[in-house]
Image (cartoon, grey):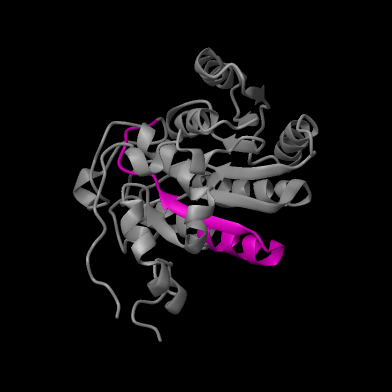
């Protein structure tokens, strides 16, 4: 029988997703995080370092910001090999070079976990008032950028590689004033990741990191996107859990990082029986 109880919410990391849990260890793994110079990306990188990742790649446009993330990680986890590999998602040759540089530094020459975190948000204005270049720049990063990222990742992906797409609740919410480019591009990106994962027989999990104030935009508490919080450790810890075997049942699903993972695991059978649950699609379609 289908369950109807909504998952519990967590405002910060909690024991079930603690990166120090032995079951969530990423020892021996290579992990690459885009947009790792600040905010959610930096915290995700830190969480993977905490879980024991052997080789950690930090990708972003600003080498100075990536260097700060690296210094923070190495201060607490000196045993993790952290590699700063500047790259621009919107430039195919740049992001390809960044991924190749990182992969070449790993023992296997492959990448085990790809965290697609980098993104852009348009200036918040109605559709007929937003600057066209600003509008399409959002698509350039969120859609073309991830297209470039995935094409660069393909030849370097480990056989059992996992992709984590840091998405947004805005990808499924019908309308939020002024966010036309962001909502549309985030929804389009989900489909691109799904296509790639199916074609390459890899697992992808999309997740909404939560309501936080970051460099790409402010929180929108009135939009009803979940419980607002300031702690960045939640999306980082959730990403580590999502990359583990415990989250395998969430392949190609869109979930919230704030949802309780034990509640999610209780829905595993329901998810197996309903391939449309927690996906972006037509409501009520059978």
User: Relative to residue 278, is residue 163 depicted above or below?
Assistant: above
Q: Judge whether residue 209 is colored magenta.
A: yes
* Residue 119 percent location from the top left of the image: 50, 41
User: Who's the residue at 66% across and 46% down the image?
Assistant: 149
144, above or below 60, in the image:
below
The residue sitting at 24% across, 53% down in the picture is: 8
| 129 sits left or right of 144 in the view | left
Residue 195 spot, x, y in % from top left: 62, 65
* The one of 96 and 245 positioned closer to us in this rendering: 245
In reply to whether residue 129 is colored magenta, the answer given is: no
Q: Residue furthest left?
A: 222
In the depicted view, which residue is nearer to us: 270 or 60? 270
Specify the quadrant that holds the C terminus: bottom left
Please name whichever residue, 141 or 165, is drawn nearer the observer in this view of the structure: 165
Tell me if I can see residue 146 in this picture: yes
Query: Along the horizontal axis of the image, is 121 left or right of 111?
Result: left
Residue shown at 67% from the left, 36% from the top: 28
Q: Is residue 128 visible?
A: no
x and y, in percent, of residue 160 in the image? 68, 54
139 left or right of 103 in image: left
Q: Quadrant of residue 176?
A: bottom left
Quarter of the figure with residue 127: bottom left
In the rendered structure, which segment of residues is drawn in magenta?
190-214
């Amino acid at each position: 029988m289908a369950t109807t109880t909504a998952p519990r919410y967590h405002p910060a990391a909690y024991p079930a997703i603690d990166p120090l849990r032995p079951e969530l260890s990423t020892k021996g793994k290579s992990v690459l995080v885009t947009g790792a110079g600040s905010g959610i990306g930096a915290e995700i990188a830190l969480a993977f370092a905490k879980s024991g990742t052997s080789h950690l790649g930090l990708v972003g446009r600003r080498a100075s910001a990536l260097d700060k993330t690296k210094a923070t990680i190495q201060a607490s986890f000196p045993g993790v090999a952290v590699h700063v590999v500047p790259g621009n998602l919107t430039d195919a040759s740049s992001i390809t070079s960044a991924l190749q540089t990182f992969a070449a530094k790993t023992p296997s020459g492959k990448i085990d976990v790809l965290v697609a975190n980098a993104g852009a948000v348009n200036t918040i204005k109605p559709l007929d008032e937003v600057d066209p270049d600003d509008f399409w720049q959002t698509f350039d990063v969120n859609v073309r950028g991830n297209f470039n990222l995935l094409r660069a990742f393909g030849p370097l992906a480990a056989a059992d590689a996992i992709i984590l797409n840091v998405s947004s609740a805005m990808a499924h919410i019908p309308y939020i004033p002024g966010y036309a480019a962001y909502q549309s591009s985030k929804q389009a990106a989900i489909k691109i990741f799904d296509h790639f994962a199916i074609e390459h027989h890899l697992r992808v999990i999309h997740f909404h990191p939560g309501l936080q104030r970051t460099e790409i935009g402010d929180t929108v508490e009135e939009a009803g996107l979940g419980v607002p919080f300031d702690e960045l450790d939640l999306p980082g810890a959730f990403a580590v859990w999502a990359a583990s075997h415990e989250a395998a049942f969430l392949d190609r699903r869109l979930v919230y990082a704030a949802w309780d993972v034990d509640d999610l695991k209780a829905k595993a059978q329901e998810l197996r029986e309903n391939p449309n649950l927690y996906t972006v699609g037509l409501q009520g379609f059978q």
